[in-house]
Amino acid sequence: MKIMAVDVGSVRTGLAVSESGFAFPVCVIQERNFKECVKKVCEKAIECKAEKIVVGYPKNMNNTVGPRAKLSEEFAAELGRMSSLPVQLWDERNTTKSAVNCLNATDTRGKKRKAVIDAVAAVIILQSYLDSPQYGNLS
């Protein structure tokens, strides 16, 4: 099953897809308009032949739902309506921090980092989902 992951942002939204159990970056969509961003993600899901979409769910460290997590909930709901694909929220706490660490390890800085960090975060979200013990029961 081909799965797409989405790291929702207010300006940049990162996308990744799975191939043979591994996550790979697709692109970063630069879009501030909520509905337009959902539409562009739907178009990429069709282009990538995704059968399911996993949306990063940035809950607070104490497991509460803050404004960013609520935005992800709304994004996932609208994405499900527009795409007709199954959409699942997936805990993404610390993925941006992990993405920063990955980019530090490769000495990716400045504008180049800004351009790819959201796609790297989407890869981390998707790989976390694919590696989870529950994955076989969730797909």
Image (cartoon, grey):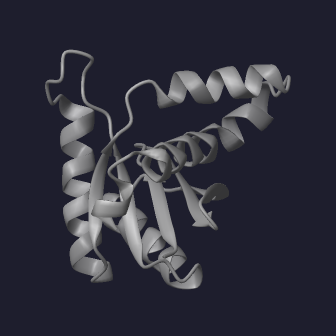
Quarter location, residue 34? bottom left
Residue 121 appears at what percent x and percent y? 55, 39
Q: Residue furthest top?
A: 62
Give whichever of 32, 73 is nearer the camera.
Answer: 73
Q: What residue do we see at 27% from left, 17% from top?
A: 61
Q: Is residue 24 left or right of residue 136?
A: right
Residue 25 appears at what percent x and percent y? 66, 55
Quarter location, residue 112? top right
Q: Give the answer, above or below, for where 42 lies relative to 102.
A: below
Give whichever of 44, 127 is nearer the camera.
Answer: 127
Q: Give the answer, above or below, for where 34 lies relative to 107.
A: below
Q: Is residue 95 left or right of residue 119?
A: left
Q: Give the answer, above or below, for where 123 lies relative to 38.
A: above
Q: What residue do we see at 25% from left, 30% from top?
A: 59
Q: Quadrant of the C terminus?
A: bottom left
Count of numbered badges drawn on the protein: 0
Q: Residue furthest right?
A: 107
Q: What residue do we see at 28% from left, 79% from top?
A: 82
Give whichever of 75, 131 is nearer the camera.
Answer: 131
Q: Is residue 64 left or right of residue 21?
A: left
Q: Residue furthest left?
A: 64
Residue 50 appears at what percent x and percent y? 49, 77
Residue 44 appears at what percent x and percent y? 54, 75
Q: What residue do we see at 58% from left, 83% from top?
A: 47
